[in-house]
């Protein structure tokens, strides 16, 4: 090969190297990912055009009944974007944003709280939510003879003696295709001077204390309370357990009655903090529960 031939070969090699370097730089810059060039990506045997975010993703809430998947549930949404406070009317966000959502359906369903939802790089983001239907829970008490107590004291009661202690059965019956949230149950003796304690023993029950919730109205000035948290009741589930009551030394519970009142907790935005709370009342003492399930046992 002559000298001119060798020179041409060198030029060709240098040119090819420059082309490779240029292509590499263009690739790294993401140039070839732009749909404006009409490029496409082969995925699983099909050709897909990559989505390039315009900076906005449309948000859609898709609510369904938690026990009846074919039933759609509408709601009003409050959405917090990247921890910057809850707002209504939020319909778009940016890919990568973190959303917290409170979805409320007034009376038919308990509110739903979704925390930490990541917005995808997509033109739309359909956010699924399962709503628990607000149903009825029937609370029944049975005396130590296992006879069902008539709520209100007009029929079957619990007989007592001075200084006595009694373990009565309790049953909470849910409603088919309806759910509660976790609940707070208040056991109230109408005469705290006579009753030493009241203990609720059902699966998952946790003693909270004896402080009166702000919204709660006592049966009388001499009442005493024992407050418990219990798990949710799902569908037609029957939850069974016991209620133990004990008289104070030398006292009889005659003419005393025991109220059992259970309140489902709800999700709501606390006005004092702007954060979502899960409780039966807010910081101002306003009841937030959608329902109350109760029974009353008289001692004779």
Image (cartoon, grey):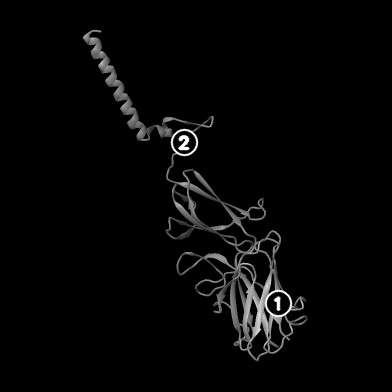
Image location of residue 177, percent across then percent down? 69, 58
Residue 260 in percent (x, y) is at 65, 76
Q: Quadrant of residue 215?
A: bottom right
Q: Which residue corresponds to the image point at 31% horizontal and 28% vertical from the top-left?
A: 21
Residue at the limit of the structure toward the left, as seen here: 3
Closer to the eye: label 2 or 1: 1
Label located before the other in sequence (2 or 1) = 2
Residue 128 lies, in percent from the top left, at 57, 51
Q: Which residue is mark 1?
A: 168
* Position of 74 relative to 31 (above/below): below
Q: Residue at x 48, y 34 (%)?
A: 49
Q: At which x and y percent is residue 125?
A: 52, 47
User: Split into 4 quadrants, where in the image is the C terminus?
Assistant: bottom right
Which of 11 and 202 lies nearest the eye of the viewer?
Answer: 202
Q: Residues within 10 Å of mark 1 (few under 14, many from 20)?
A: many
Residue 245: which quarter of the image? bottom right
The front one of 140 and 120 is 140
Please give the name of the residue rendered at 34% of the width and 30% of the height, measured from the top-left corner.
24
Quadrant location of the N terminus in the rendered image:
top left
Relative vertical location of residue 37 with respect to residue 248 in this rendering, above or below: above
Secondary element at image label 1: strand
The one of 204 and 60 positioned closer to us in this rendering: 204
Measure the alpha-carbon separation of dots 2 and 1: 66 Å
Is 53 left or right of 46, judged from the image as shown?
Answer: left
Quick check: 19 left or right of 57? left
* Count of marks, rendered view: 2
75 or 102, which is in the foreground? 102
Res 129 visible: yes
Label annotation for residue 50: 2
């Amino acid at each position: 090969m002559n000298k001119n031939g060798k020179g041409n070969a060198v030029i060709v090699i240098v040119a090819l190297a420059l082309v490779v370097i240029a292509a590499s730089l263009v690739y790294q810059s993401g140039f070839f990912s732009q749909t404006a060039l009409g490029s496409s990506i082969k995925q699983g045997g099909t050709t897909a055009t990559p989505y390039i975010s315009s900076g906005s993703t449309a948000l859609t809430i898709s609510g369904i009944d938690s026990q009846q998947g074919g039933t759609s549930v509408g709601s009003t949404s409050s959405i917090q974007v990247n921890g910057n406070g809850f707002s209504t009317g939020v319909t778009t966000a940016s890919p990568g944003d973190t959303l917290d959502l409170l979805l409320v359906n007034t009376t038919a369903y308990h509110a739903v709280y979704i925390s930490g939802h990541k917005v995808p790089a997509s033109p739309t983001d359909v956010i699924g939510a399962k709503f628990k239907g607000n149903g009825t829970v029937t609370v029944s008490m049975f005396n130590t003879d296992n006879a069902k107590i008539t709520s209100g004291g007009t029929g079957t009661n619990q007989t007592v003696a001075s200084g006595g202690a009694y373990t009565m059965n309790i049953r909470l019956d849910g409603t088919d295709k309806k759910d509660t949230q976790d609940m707070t149950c208040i056991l109230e003796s109408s005469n705290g001077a006579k009753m030493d304690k009241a203990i609720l023993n059902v699966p998952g029950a946790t003693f909270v204390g004896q402080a009166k919730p702000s919204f709660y109205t006592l049966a009388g000035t001499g009442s005493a309370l024992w407050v418990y948290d219990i798990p949710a009741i799902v569908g037609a589930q029957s939850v069974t357990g016991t209620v133990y009551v004990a008289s104070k030394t030398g006292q009889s519970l005659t003419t005393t009655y025991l109220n059992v009142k259970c309140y489902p907790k709800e999700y709501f935005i606390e006005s004092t903090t702007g954060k979502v709370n899960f409780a039966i009342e807010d910081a101002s003492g306003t009841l937030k529960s959608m329902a109350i399930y109760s029974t009353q046992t008289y001692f004779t």
